[in-house]
Image: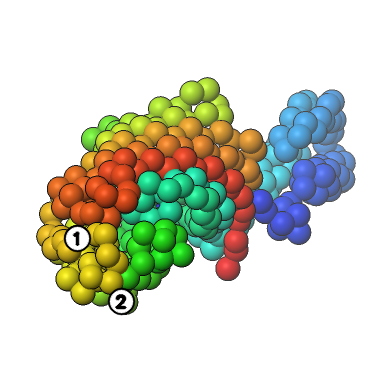
Amino acid sequence: MKLQGCCNVSPAKRQPSTAIASQVFSVFGAAGRASNAAGGELSVNRFRLSGMGVGRVFSVKTSFFARFLALAAMVLPAASMITAFSALAQEAAKSASNTWVVTLGGTVEYGPSYEGSKHLSFSGMPSFDFHRLGETPEYSAPDDNIDYSLFDVGGIEAGPVVGLRGGRSAFDDSDLNGLHRVHWNFDAGAFAQYWPMENQLRLRAEMRQALWGGDGLLADLSLDWFQPVGDRWLLSAGPRMSLANSTYMRNNFGISESEAAKNGHLDAFDANGGLKSVGFTVAATYTISPAWSVQVYNKYNRLVSDAADSPITSQIGSPNQNIIGFTLNRTFDVRF
């Protein structure tokens, strides 16, 4: 998801090199005793242990039976090592399949107090991402909502997505007195994305419906270019386009006749669905360590059509909506 690590194997599961060496010595000892009993001679010139690899050089001056024992002394330790490494690989694969890499983040933004506002304020929000250990994590933009890819057909990924919408009231701006309140809301829907250039150029679309309150439907389109710089920096930039249905537009930019009468200085306005905004997003991410990263970004959107013509925007607000954000991320492994 959208909605990064190494596999650590428990020491109890790992067969140390010293244990393998002891098996080899015991087999060599048995081989030597058997060779002497058979009247042969087996002399071991040199045996060295280096890390997990075992090197051995020895000369044999003996009968056929002693040579057979010497050959067994070489084969048996090798078989033991293969068995140990196989068990280790199986344990690592099992661990990877049960381990998820989770990234939790906290974001602080400075931007319009509500959509269409000219007043600026601070706000905060969480971020969340996870993927299975061993999967290559994909790049993402700061305005991506929480998603999880369920399908990948012909290079097109798709799955569910969940987002959060801000609210608006007269507490944010006294000029809104008499107008209906817009409640904060969760929305959910589906996303699809395609990488014309893998992990570099991405085309993405999201469509999300408000979960309650009749706040309407949103569709966001984006195109992003991702550029790594060195081992720690990742830069991204790309254009944005947002569309909304008439329910969303009336709730956020419409003013009824009765509301206009209560307010006293804003005219009634009937907002229709269609293109809501166009813009651009840039971001820079710095990886401090495998566990920690920071991101700074700027999101600029220009309200257009009825979103810009609404008195909420044109009389007491601004069509220029710019948001500066800072995110701190912590990544860790979770095993089930």
Q: Residue at x 40, y 66 (%)?
A: 169
Q: Is residue 185 above or below residue 222?
A: below
Amino acid on which disc 1 is placed: Asp
Residue 270 drawn at (x, y percent): 13, 63
Q: Is residue 15 above or below residue 223?
A: below
**Can the viewer see residue 27 in this picture?**
no
User: Which of marks 1 and 2 precedes in the sequence?
Assistant: 2
Left or right of 225? Residue 174 is: right
Q: Residue at x 73, y 51 (%)?
A: 15
Crowding near pointer 2: few (<14 within 10 Å), some, many (20+)?
few
Determine which residue is flagged by label 2: 213
Q: Residue furthest bottom?
A: 212
Q: Which mark is residue 93?
A: none
Residue 232 drawn at (x, y percent): 56, 29
Determine which residue is flagged by label 1: 267
- The quadrant in which the C terminus is found is bottom right
Q: Is residue 188 above or below residue 51?
A: below
Task: Place residue 170 in its image quadrant.
Answer: bottom left
Residues 27 and 139: in front is 139
Q: Is residue 52 above or below residue 231?
A: below
Crowding near pointer 1: few (<14 within 10 Å), some, many (20+)?
some
Q: Residue at x 78, y 27 (%)?
A: 58
